[in-house]
Amino acid sequence: MNFKDWATRVMLISLVFVALIVALLVGTTRLQNNTPESALAQPAAGIASWSQYPNAQMRSPIKPSSAANPRKSLFKTTAAFTKYRPRYEIAWADPSNYGERYTKDVNGIKVNNLPIIVLHETSNSAQSAINFFQTPHTDENVQASYHAMIKLDGTVIYTVPPDKRAYGAANSVFDSANGSESVKTNLNLPPSVNNFAYHVSLETPPDGWTDTEPIHSGYTEAQYYSLAWLIAQSDVPDDRITTHRLVDRSETRIDPRSFDGEKFLNLLHNFRQVSE
């Protein structure tokens, strides 16, 4: 083989390799360009964009606003609210531990209670509550959940969507200016406030991980700030914010223990004001 033939063969082999490399690069680019945007932007499990959460714009679940019947907000958030940004987590409860909000009670009578907010404490760690809520329960006497929890470091944990009925207070009644309010939605269970309540629970400090004592060391500053920040997003007035202790009719609930109501209301008023 002379030099000319050898050089020609080397050039042909080189061109073949170059063509293969170009084909591979083009194929990879096409795969990348054909990947759906939703897949590229898909967040990790349990994480949502900040624009989606918090999802706690609490209005009446019975009469939602519409273009024909717009709802005017009672409150507006402040600059202090805007500056405070707590961490958040999403840990959805198992569907067996929450349900739909009803428009009629077990007797077919329409219900139109305005929303209330019920404050609780976990009685143990926030993680233990999450574990319980995420465990399926078929026994109606065991099912339980909150809409949100606030950890000791101020992190807000969302566990039940606000438009759903969390099972936060079993045998309960809310005493309002209009009288005693409760709704019976289950023939086998006593009436409760769950149908019109938004349940928020504070993580109990370790020294209070037994509910036999009436007090404990109390909640952190971060918890008070995050609680006020969360509730500032609602249209629920001060006189419809209550505690599990006050609505309970089983005479067994004393939470939230060691709660400083004055501190909480001062922070809440700093984060929201009455709309003009």
Image (spheres, rainbow, N blue to C red):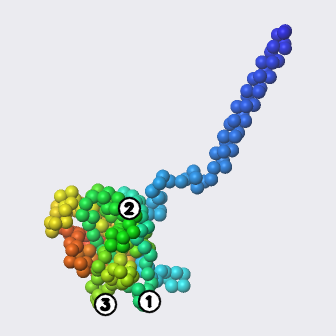
Q: Is residue 201 left or right of residue 21?
A: left
Find the distance from the CA under tag 2 to the CA under tag 3: 38 Å
Name the element at disc 1: loop
Q: Is residue 52 left or right of residue 195?
A: right
Q: For mark 1, does the 10 Å Cα neighbourhood hold few (<14), some (14 to 19), or many (20 or more) residues?
A: few
Q: Which image quadrant for residue 205? A: bottom left
Q: In the rendered view of the protein, which quadrant contains the N terminus?
A: top right
Picture layout, residue 206 above or below residue 172: above
Mark 2 — residue?
A: 135
Q: Which numbered mark, 3 or 1, is in the foreground of this view?
A: 1
Q: In the image, what residue occupies the spot 69% across and 35% down?
A: 24
Report which quarter residue 263 is drawn in: bottom left
Residue 56: where, in percent of width, then height? 41, 70
C-alpha span from label 3 to label 1:
21 Å
Label located before the other in sequence (1 or 2): 1
Q: Earlier in the sequence, mark 2 or mark 3?
A: 2
| Residue 39 visible in this rendered orientation of the protein | yes
Amino acid type of disc 2? Answer: Thr
Which residue in the protein does label 3 denote? 178
Residue 136: mark: none
Residue 251 coordinates in the image, percent (x, y) = 21, 77
224 above or below 242?
A: above
The answer, for residue 79, to whether it is visible in the render is no
How dense is the environment of label 3, judged by Cα within 10 Å: few (below 14), some, or many (20 and up)? Answer: few
Question: Which residue is disc 1 drawn over?
Answer: 108
Amino acid, disc 3: Asn
Residue 260: x and y in percent read 20, 69
Q: Is residue 72 above or below residue 143?
A: below
Q: Between 95 and 200, which is closer to the camera in this rendering? A: 95
Please state which of residues 3 and 98 is positioned toward the viewer in this rendering.
98
Please, what secondary structure does the residue beneath circle 3 have?
Answer: loop
